[in-house]
Amino acid sequence: MAEEKKIAETVADVSRRQFFVKLGLGSLSIAAVGTTVFAYQYLSPNVLYEPSPIINAGKPESYALDSVTLDVNSGIYIIRAKEGFFSLSAVCTHLGCLTAWKPELGVIACPCHGSKFRQNGEKIEGPAPKPLPWKRMWVNDDGDLMVDRSTDIHPMEFVRV
Ligand code: FES
């Protein structure tokens, strides 16, 4: 009888030991996974991937003389005037709404608070504090009009093709 009790205590002792070993291994595994996740996040570059500011606006022939073309996706106008091509930002300088060309009025108008701009970007009226900026434009080796949305230039720098 005493022998059986001693064996039962030994079995209970072993299972308790196994339980704590498994608990310890489980805890270490969870800590290892957490450490790996944080290390991966720490070592990953903290970079915001944005689309390129360089836009290919296509062939000059595709723009009629005295035309104002809005590229909604890139937020720029491609304007073909008598003096040549130029590009304007289509983003209002007040609070950043996308403006629209109104051919019946001959102005670029902002739908948000009513700012209006001339075809060359000059402000006519409204709360916008500055004119629409001109963007750097050039013709690449394939003869396509290119615009750098990230670079403002002085007004009246036309691209002649
Ligand atoms: S955002 Fe254009 S006028 Fe306010």
Image: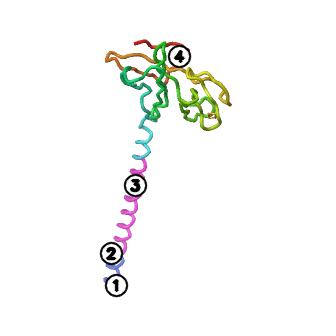
Q: In front: mark 4 or mark 2? A: 4
The residue tagged 2 is 11
Provide the secondary structure element on which disc 3 rests: helix
Direction from residue 137 to residue 121 in the image, left or right: right
Query: What amino acid is at disc 2?
Result: Val
* Whether label 4 touches label 2, CB < 8 Å: no
The crowd level at tag 2 (other Cα within 10 Å; few <14, some 14-19, many 20+) is few
Q: CA distance from mark 3 to mark 4?
A: 60 Å
Query: What amino acid is at disc 4?
Result: Ile
**Which span of residues is magenta-colored?**
10-35
User: Quarter of the picture for ligand 1?
Assistant: top right
Q: CA distance from mark 4 to mark 1?
A: 98 Å
Q: Earlier in the sequence, mark 4 or mark 2?
A: 2
The residue tagged 4 is 153
Residue 2 is marked as 1
The residue tagged 3 is 28
Which residue is at a point 42% across and 25% down the rendered structure image? 54
Of residue 125 and residue 76, the one placed in the foreground of this image is 125
Point out the image quarter for the C terminus.
top left
Query: What amino acid is at disc 1?
Result: Ala
Residue 59 is marked as none
Provide the secondary structure element on which disc 4 rests: strand
